[in-house]
Image: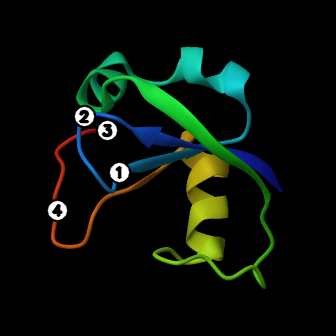
Amino acid sequence: MKCVVYKGMRKQGTYLYVASAETLTELPRALLDQLGELQQVMDLDLTPQVNLAAADPAAVMNSIESRGFYLQLPPGAQTNTC
């Protein structure tokens, strides 16, 4: 699965994974507001065998397929978004 990773500029260590840049317009406004400005950091070709530093690739893929995004928060952080 191809995906694009963005860094949220409002809170350090927050990353948003989406299928493509075009899908950003389809995300909930509340989510985007909490992230602030987004900076693209990488394009990934996700597979269950890919090693990610702070997320399970299968969970990322499942979330993108079912919700349209995967939100990675810094350790110990909680959210009440979407």
Front tag of 4 and 2: 2
SS at badge 3: loop
Task: Tell me if mark 1 has few (under 14), some (14-19) or many (20+) residues whose alpha carbon lies within 10 angstroms of its own.
Answer: some
Residue 8 placement, left or right of 46: left
Tag 4 and tag 2, C-beta contact below 8 Å: no
Q: Give the residue type that dot 2 points to.
A: Arg
Q: Give the residue type that dot 4 points to.
A: Ala
Report the disc number at residue 54: none
Q: Name the residue under label 1.
A: 14
Give the mark nearer the N terminus: 1 vs 3.
1
Residue 38 locus on image (x, y percent): 46, 28
Residue 11 locus on image (x, y percent): 23, 44
Q: Image quadrant of residue 28?
A: top left
Tag 2 and tag 1, C-beta contact below 8 Å: yes
Q: Give the residue type that dot 1 points to.
A: Thr
Q: Residue at x 69, y 26 (%)?
A: 21
Q: Name the residue under label 3.
A: 82
Q: Give the residue type that dot 3 points to.
A: Cys
Q: Mark 4 points at which residue?
A: 77
Q: In which quarter of the image is the C terminus?
A: top left
Residue 44 placement, left or right of 55: right
